[in-house]
Image (tube, rainbow, N blue to C red):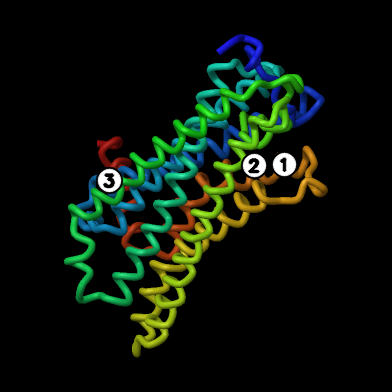
Amino acid sequence: MSNSSFPNEFLLLPFAGTRELQLLHFGLFLGIYLAALLGNGLILTAVACDHRLHTPMYFFLLNLALLDLGTITTTVPKAMANFLWDTRIISYLECVAQIFFFFFFLSAEFFLLIIMAYDRYIAICKPLQYGTVMDSRTCVNMAAAVWGSTFLYAVLHTAKTISLPLCQGNALDQFFCEVPQILKLSCSDAYLREVGLLVVSVSLSFGCFVFLVLSYVQIFRAVLRIPSVHGRNKAFSTCLPHLVVVSLFLSTATFTYLKPPSISSSSLNLLLAVLYSVVPPAVNPLIYSMRNQELKDAVWKLMTGGFSEAIN
């Protein structure tokens, strides 16, 4: 690849023009990042240490926490460094790394959420078959398939993106290296191949979304047939958090990539990027633990146990 086909560095979109606002944004992003580290770290530790949580649902939740940590670590630390040091520059290698890891973690999270919906469907609609269908080996194979396939998918996307010749400058209309913003800098029809790949990806994602909707239709029908109020509440407590997480993730990500160019603006792009790449990793642990008593008990036991050990 020649040096002229891809810049040595890019200029990211600044959040603010004054030093005070930059430091304010640094503090805001730092708080969100620390909340994501704490929340997802507690879930990882609680699921790993509490044998009562060694079930398929919590195994997939552990994988989701790992992906959330990866997603927010891909974008936020670099943005915080730029806020702190008053710069907009991101190097070529950093940009390529962001493209790869962002596609990897984000696509893996999407397909993992689909698998988690399938897990809830089997647990609620076919409870007698749950132990057979969702055994430990099947769960590990599903998780491995998600991690492996999305790794190859990210490699393909990254290779196609960095092979594009760019001649529209090096200023990106985003606070990290986002593929749609890089495509705007392309100076040839070669970008249509990447657009075609994105269209195929969106079509596949739409098919998965239809599967998810049909699964939840069956889930809610089964839940409403449960005679006891306690049984319905317990079933809803495992489904509603997942549904909230999926809705937040899909609505913001879909609107980001499919919104008409006529309503595109720098401020809107920034807001949407924060909503689908920064906020979910920080709030997902709270959403999942809000109505899940088992998880809350495990986290509380972990926190109080660690505090007691520290005192002793």
Please tell me how crowded label 2 is: few (under 14), some (14-19), or many (20+) other residues with Cα within 10 Å: some
Residue most toward the bottom? 227
Q: Is mark 3 on a helix, strand or loop?
A: helix
Work out how far the residue at label 1 is from the one at label 2, CA to CA, in angstroms. 6 Å
Relative image position of residue 28 (x, y in whole percent):
64, 36
How packed mark 3 is, by other alpha carbons closer than 10 Å (few <14, some 14-19, many 20 or more), is few
Q: In this view, does 162 lie above or below 203?
A: above
Q: In this view, does 233 lie to the left or right of 167?
A: left
Look at discs 3 and 1 and give the one toward the viewer: 1
Residue 36 in percent (x, y) is at 49, 41
Determine whether the residue tagged by mark 2 lies in a helix, strand or loop: helix
Disc 2 designates what residue? 273
Q: In which quarter of the image is residue 105?
A: top left
Q: Name the residue under label 3.
A: 305
Q: 280 or 204, which is in the foreground?
A: 204
Q: Which residue is pictured at 25% across the width and 75% down the height?
A: 127
Q: On the image, numbered disc 1 is attached to which residue?
A: 269
Instruction: Please say whether residue 243 is visible from this viewpoint.
Output: yes
The mark lying in front, picked from 3 and 2, is 2
Would you place residue 299 above or below residue 227 in this image?
A: above
Identity, as a three-letter code, of the amino acid under mark 3: Gly
In percent of the image, x 49 and y 69: which residue is there?
Answer: 213
178, 38: nearer the viewer: 178
